[in-house]
Amino acid sequence: MRLFGTSGVRGVINEEITSESMLNLGKAVGTTIPVGSQVCVASDPRLSRDMIKSSLTAGVLSTGVNVVDLGILPTPCLAYLTRELKMDSGMMITASHNPPEFNGVKLWNPSTIGYSVEQEQLVERIYFDEAFRTVPWSSLGHVKKHENAHTHYFEAVRGRISVDTSLKVVVDPGNGAASHIASQLFEKMGISVLPVNDIPDGRFPTRPSEPREDTLKETIQYLRDEGGDLAVCFDGDADRVVFCDNQGFLGYNEMIAYISYLVVKESSRKVVATTVETGRLLDCAAGKAGGTVERGKVGDVHVAQLLKEKNACIGVEQVGVYILPEIGMHPDSLYAALFLLSNIDHPSQIRQFIASLPTMHFAKSSVRCPNHEKERVMKRVQSSLSELSPSDVNMLDGIRIEFDDSWLLIRPSGTEPVIRVLCESESLSAMETFLNEGNQMVEKALEKVDP
């Protein structure tokens, strides 16, 4: 039985995520590190944050480990501060891009890399066996609050990058963890900022916490109305970022391709680390700068590990995740956005670069599937692959089926009760056909699963 998904522990409040489960998670995490250690904790603004933080903190304290409370912070800040403040572990309370009824916890190492599968398995064993360490009353941990901890992160960013731009930038945190913080940082970098959806609110009242083309229409209109040049839009905990200009939404694959191109062009290291979900545009863009692409499993921890293993200059995920090792081995949407702004004079440069790439059609869909049925469904999908006559099949993470000018990925989500179907093709009709066939394969496999 697994407690962790691809991005920490996550679920619906008072169903999968309860005060009891968070108490025991805190005990399990505390048990893995020495008595007297320190862990920092931060959260996004979801309404369940206090329930989780109090339970999680109580569990950690009971094992003799101290807690430093950093308040509401974006994930990039928490990950960076785990190293900067010399913590033994970091705990981010967030469900990232999920709806407000979800919440969870992601764990970070002092290296700024999230917990590895092996570390998560150790926590899980202690959690399920209830093999928690107990200490005498005199050795219990204590809590310390650290106000304005984000200023340490601001100093680190300003020491690594400078932005000289006349662009007017709309900053849209979506009422998430980057509210106030992103606009403050951008202003300190000398950027003219037009903030929107910039008040932290765990209900995410102005738009869903996942920034997508269909959820950013009002932001794009605001950009046009206010005479802005570029919009920078974050998810609930700001580990993801997407971009828009006056013409509309700038695609996920196109932006990871462009930013990766800029990084590869400047770097002596010519490798980009990514996942099996990422399209072939990235290979084209990296190739323009003399680079190559390495693909691994989905999840920022896997990307960070691949980045380290291949000595890559950047790690990216198709959903708008950017890992830039000069700031840390964690997803850092804030730093990525500033890096982009430091390299362009006008958003038209982005469109011009995208126009130089081959035309690729990309689509993604989700088929509802209970978490406990995912393994059996995927086995049934695998048995039906012969229907598609693929040229190559990659089983590293899900099933990626390669064709000459297309690819199809069928993969169980690690954060939601769905199986994702992704497809990219040079032909729009072929993309639509493969996506439809992928959906049908999953739906047929679901029908065959025993009730």
Image (cartoon, grey):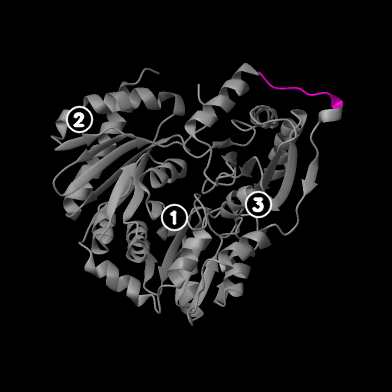
Identify which amino acid the numbered label 2 is placed on: Leu
Identify which amino acid the numbered label 1 is placed on: Tyr
Q: What element carries label 2?
A: helix
Tag 3 and tag 1, C-beta contact below 8 Å: no
Identify which amino acid the numbered label 3 is placed on: Pro
According to the picture, the residue beneath numbered tag 3 turns out to be: 45
Could one spot residue 198 in this view of the protein? Answer: no
The image quadrant that residue 266 belongs to is bottom left
Q: Is residue 231 left or right of residue 9?
A: left
**Residue 224, percent from left and from top:** 46, 77
Q: What element carries label 1?
A: strand
Name the outermost residue toward the front. 268
Residue range of the region highlighted in magenta in the rendering: 131-137
Front of the two marks 2 and 1: 1
In three-dimensional space, the C-alpha distance between marks 2 and 1, rounded to whole angstroms, equals 33 Å
Q: Which mark is residue 385?
A: 2
The image quadrant that residue 11 belongs to is top right
The image quadrant that residue 449 belongs to is top left
Mark before the other along the chain sequence, 2 or 3: 3
Principal secondary structure, stretch drawn in magenta: loop
Q: Decide which of 383, 329 is in the foreground and name it.
A: 329
Q: Which mark is residue 322?
A: 1
Residue neighbourhood size for the residue with mark 2, other residues' Cα within 10 Å, grouped as few (<14), some (14–19), many (≥20): some
Q: In which quarter of the image is the C terminus?
A: top left
**Residue 19, percent from left and from top:** 70, 32
In three-dimensional space, the C-alpha distance between marks 2 and 3, rounded to whole angstroms, equals 43 Å
Q: Residue 80 carries which label?
A: none
> Is 242 situated above or below 89?
below
